Amino acid sequence: MRPILTLSFVILFSVLFTFQIRSQVILRPNAGLKSPQTLEINKIETSLLKTVVYFTIENQIDSGYFCADKNINIVYPDGSKAKLVSASGIPQCPDTYKFRSIGEKLSFALTFPPLKQSIEWIDIIEDCPGNCFYFYGVTLNSDLNEKLDETFILASKQDPVKNIELFRNILEKVDSQNHGIKGLLYVNIISAAIEAGDRIEASVWYKRLLTSKSPRIEQYVKYLNNNGIKF
């Protein structure tokens, strides 16, 4: 019986090891653009069985309310989708959660099918009649998330001229991947150039953005235009 027991143990260990490899927790992943601004992704848990995204939203208006539409999808870089499986901690529309005060926070989780393998980023999009939420370019690579966090902290402490180079360095690393966070890096370079008073540099990078083929490029251009930046 020993060989059978040993083989069973090996098989079980192999399954558990494979499961552990495919399981991952991404804390506070960066995203390129999102709406509403008070909605945050706290973490994403991935496994062979499912993907769970944990959110928190803060109410900022009197008589505010929130719900999750049943038509929420993870959208992959190739355009394919994974539909919402279930939601917890939040009503599904048309039922709503009614906030009791300004500043109140609501935490909830959305469960999707397991992620495709070797995916560096995703979009999470609610498809509904109005006031839908979205996250574009959610970064799943922990090393890149850490680098982005460090860069944003450093950029908040130094002058805009140095920030141009700071964001250029990351852009060079993700440019060939056509990563979903690319558009955000262009936006930060352009904004830093304008803050530095160099509209020529800002114009150069604005035109590069237009020809960059960045994912969701039209959304980033719209964001800049809405903030009075257009060349």
Image (cartoon, rainbow, N blue to C red):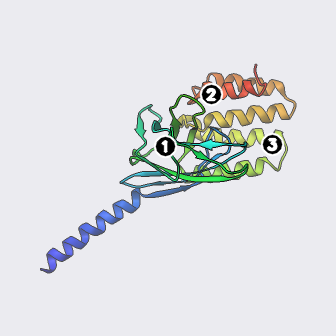
Residue furthest out toward the top = 231
| Point 36% across, 54% down: residue | 48
From the viewer's perspective, is residue 184 above or below residue 199? below
Question: Disc 3 or disc 1, which is closer to the eye?
Answer: 1
Q: Quick one: 162 or 65, which is closer to the camera?
A: 65
- Residue topped by disc 2: 219
**Quadrant showing the N terminus:** bottom left
Could you say which is closer to the camera, residue 195 or residue 227? 227
Disc 3 versus disc 1: distance between alpha carbons? Answer: 46 Å
Front: mark 2 or 1? 1
Q: Nearer the viewer, residue 221 or 36?
A: 36
Give the amino acid type for the residue marked by disc 2 in the picture. Answer: Gln
Find disc 3 in the rendering and name its residue.
162
Percent across and percent down for residue 174 are 58, 39
| Residue pictured at 41% horizontal, 39% vertical | 83
**Quick one: SS at disc 2?**
helix
**Marker disc for residue 77:** none
SS class of the residue under badge 1? Answer: loop
Which SS class for mark 3?
Answer: helix
Residue 156 as seen in the image, left or right of residue 217 = right
State whether residue 75 appears in this view: no
- Mark 2 or 1, nearer chain start: 1
206 displayed left or right of 177? right
Disc number lying in front (2 or 3): 2
Label 2 and label 3: CA atoms lie apart by 26 Å
- Residue 92: which disc? 1
Q: Please state which amino acid type lies under the numbered disc 1.
A: Gln
